[in-house]
Amino acid sequence: MGVQEISFYTPFYLLVFMIPLVIINYKMRININKRFIYAVFRMTIQLVLVGFFLQYIFLFNNPWVNSAYILFMISAAALSTVKTCGLTLRSQLIPILLGFGIPNMIMILFINQFVIGLNNIFDAQYYIPLMGMLLGNSLSGNIIGINTFYNGLKKNEREYHYRLALSANQWEATLPWYKEAVIACLNPTIATTETIGLVSLPGMMTGQILGGSMPMTAIVYQIVIMAAILISRYFGIHLSILLTRKKAFDSYDRLKI
């Protein structure tokens, strides 16, 4: 049995709940209405455009076109991270791009080849949605981790300089905040992994069940993607910090960012 079709217009029924939300915010002077409305509007436009675009990509299913779209996704994630974390676009975009691209590309190709066993590891049906899940989680993880690392250094600059004065090298002096960044990056994913199935039925599993897959098949896929998210997020934050820090300090080990 396939998934129940939903009309393009039925999501607008949710306005029944959104309108009171806006009114309550206005009455209580909770200043998030503009952001809320903009976010919903932007999400709708983006998803509609992506939906039309992906229909043609899935029909064409060319490995080069699929990979070009993946590169676009990675670039968008890297650009968003640079802007959100307040990094310098010119010097830090490439390091962040590599921090996203390398672990996630290795992970998605490994899954498609050895876990799922696809004949075409660039098949759009698997390649693009799975990569989207990995990148979405890497994006939030990288932002949390990078902000934790550099903000921790800025707030504790005296302690950092004191460590340098005691003959520690840059790596040794920054190690406490490096560890904090890795932990901060992984904590949400670890918490989700620990409670998955008890607190929530995750998106991939729910989507497969709605699409007609047997629950056990959906569970196996969900185990794969959660393990892949945890692994790629872990290596992604390590790589992102290691690459960005090369240009984040001057020749005297002073933080420039």
Image (cartoon, rainbow, N blue to C red):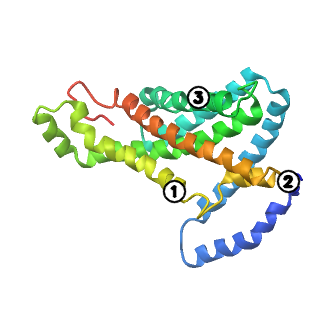
Q: Residues within 10 Å of mark 1 (few under 14, many from 20)?
A: few
Residue 194 numbered tag = 1
Q: Quadrant of the C terminus?
A: top left
Rounded to the nearest angstrom, the CA distance separating label 2 from label 3 is: 30 Å
What secondary structure is marked by label 1? helix
Instruction: Give the residue drawn at x 42%, y 41%.
Output: 86
Q: Is residue 42 visible?
A: no
- In this view of the protein, which residue sits in the foreground, 255 or 144? 144
Q: Is residue 22 visible?
A: yes
In the image, is 158 to the left or to the right of 136?
left
Residue 105 numbered tag = 3
Q: Is residue 86 above or below residue 216?
A: above
Mark 2 highlights which residue? 3
Residue 153 numbered tag = none
What's the amino acid at mark 2?
Val
- Which one is earlier in the sequence, the residue at label 2 or at label 3? 2
Rounded to the nearest angstrom, the CA distance separating label 2 from label 1 is: 29 Å
Instruction: Give the residue drawn at x 26%, y 39%.
Output: 175
Rounded to the nearest angstrom, the CA distance separating label 3 from label 1 is: 25 Å
From the top left corner, tell me how far across and down residue 88 is, in percent.
Answer: 42, 33
